[in-house]
Image (spheres, rainbow, N blue to C red):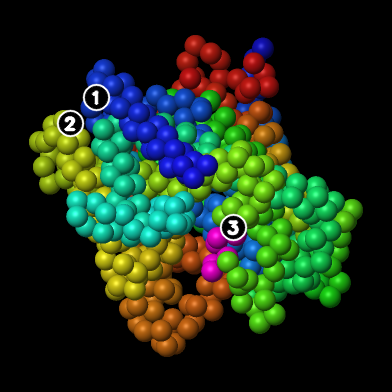
Amino acid sequence: MTDPPPDKLRPLRIRLTVVFLTALLIGPGLGAHLSGGDPENVRFLFGVPALYLWLVFTCLVMTSCILIAARNLWRDED
Amino acid sequence: MDYIPHITLVLYLGGLLTLGILGLLKSRRAKHAEADYYLASRGQGVLTTSLTIMATYFSGFAILTFPGWVYGNGVPPMFYALNLPVAAAAIYILGNPIRRIGRKRGYITPADMIADYYGDSQFIRGMVAFLGALYVVPYVVMQVKAGGILAQGLFPDIASVTLLGQELTMENAGVGALSLITMTYVIVGGMRSVAWTDVLQGLLLLSAMLLSGVVLMHALGGPSGYFKEVSQLDGQLLTMPDAPAKFNAWHAVTFCAFASLASIVQPAQWMRFYAARDSATLRRTAIAFSTILPICFIFGVFLVGLGGRALYPMLADGSLPVGLTNPDQIVVRVIQDLFPELLGTVGVILVSLILVAVMAASMSTADSNLHALSAVATRDVYHQLRPKAGEKERTWFGRAVIVIATLAAAGITYAGSGTNLLDTIAAFFFLAMAFSAQLLPITIDLLFLRRGTKAGAVAGLVAGMIVVFLFPPLGALLFGEGSALVSGTGKLKALLDVGFCGMVVNTIVFVFVSRFTTPPDTAHREAFAQDLRNQPQLKADLPISKQ
């Protein structure tokens, strides 16, 4: 098997970076405000505070980016 | 059953000393004394590297402060756990090129690399070493102190012990014992002992974090019972607050992005990158860091903090319930109350193990920072003053630094809380990450951009440091609590991470000054870039998915 030319990995690299940074910005920011509701009207999903589930989801997205990068972009060299 | 804490502690401390001796025995065959003492001959594998990086990254903060925040403020502080994927990415993206060029050029400290690139200036080396010391020294003192407090928690019924005719409180006895043992295994075995003990301490800490959450959830009747209790909590604990309230979104984002990176470029972690065996080690470490730690936090100690609020509600006037003098104690309180009740003798053993794990968290950070301080003092100060000193002489000097630093840390702690010196050190501790963050702009420049100049780097570092000094609590010490400046930076601190603020100014100054000054020689920059580049060996340079 031959290594794909480096520029074929560039779109994946860019996509992962954008998704990762978006999750980092939106996660505790807009997403948290929208998902959690307000103190007088807390949102729950399946009996679990929605804010907590949103944290789990955001963390899952960011971790997935790392796992995909580790598998496809980060190369073992020695 | 009364002796279980004693037995657990003796076994744990005995284990640490044994690992110290094993580290010494292994190092006797080393060809290069200094590289072996500080970097374990650059041969650490994935288990050691991942656990030592994790254990160094988190002190008692992981099992005390962080769940304490959740107890006091609910779900919002949990978002600070998003710093973990950021740090994981940095372990590979920053750590691997650092490892690669460190191996090629024989670097041991961060200043070795930075000074080599920007022109081997004594001033820049000294600045970087100084910034490193601003991180390391307060951490050593505060972790030694924390260890003493935790020892008191492990033996609550023992008020004092008599040693050589002197009566010592349990806290002071704990400080003394832990300092002595930590100092011994760091001196004896260097990076190997530090890293191997971090493996033990890291495993204890991660297990304790996860186990405490699982048992609490079980105590409340499983997930449905747990969340039924949690759903009764005040709505403010279950929703995101607006700025400038504590743990608002702005602060969370800047903390997660920049405090995590600051913790990754601090001297002890930098040395762990140099010490990693190969790129696969760091790649797998990044995977472990991004998966295991979030699980231990989000499904472990965080659930203890939140469920603890349901089990031990605050009083109507907002004060803490009886038996809880500080929110940081919530994990300890929960496990001490629940584990024996639910699990009998096994529960008592687990309580002792978890309390030892909490102590281990402090010790793992203290030993890593002691070791890093030794490297910085030796390479960046002593070696510059005595260039003809051989490897063995430098290694012995490094050991002397460890002895002096440990004795000083224990001495400051013995002097007691409320003294000016300890309060000052505590003030530096709270801004330690902010100081470390000032290394980020030059790190990114030399690894990826190589457009900055020495003058720009120095100016940026100085500017960033000055900004950090303006923030409370240090700013309050320098300019007074009531000054308009400190009042202003105090408000800014509620919105943005302090290290981030320093870094913004640092970067602006760095870029501006670099525009008008001469960069390193082109050939030098190209040679540096060449050594940073991937050099595939027999195995083709293939991504894992293609192998």
What is the count of numbered marks? 3
Front-lying residue, B193 or B482: B193
Instruction: State which tag comes first along the sequence, 1 or 3.
Output: 1
Q: Check whether the beta carbons of the residues at disc 1 and disc 3 lie within 8 A of each other.
A: no
Which residue type does callout 2 highlight? Glu
Pointer 2 or 1: first along the chain? 1
Which residue is depicted at the point 67% across and 34% down? A67
- For mark 2, what is the residue? B391
Instruction: State the separation of the CA atoms marked 1 and 3.
Output: 48 Å
Between the residue at mark 2 and the residue at mark 1, the CA separation in whole angstroms equals: 8 Å
Mark 3 is on which residue type? Arg
Which of the chains bears the disc numbered 1? Answer: B
Instruction: Please name the residue that numbered disc 1 is placed on.
Output: B32
- Parent chain of label 2: B
Q: Quadrant of residue B206?
A: top right
> Residue B466, how many percent across, how many down?
36, 69
Q: Mark 3, residues whose alpha carbon is within 10 Å: few (<14), some, or many (≥20)?
A: some
Instruction: State if disc 3 and disc 2 touch (CB < 8 Å).
Output: no
Q: Residue at x 26, y 66 (%)?
A: B415
Residue range highlighted in magenta: B324-330
Q: Secondary structure at mark 3?
A: helix
Instruction: Name the spot of residue B423 as percent of width and height, x first.
Output: 35, 70
The lab-note entry on whether marks 2 and 3 share a chain reads yes
For the residues carrying marks 1 and 3, which lies nearer the camera in this image? Answer: 3
Q: Secondary structure at mark 2?
A: helix
Label 1 sits on what residue type? Answer: His
Q: Quadrant of the C terminus of chain B?
A: top right
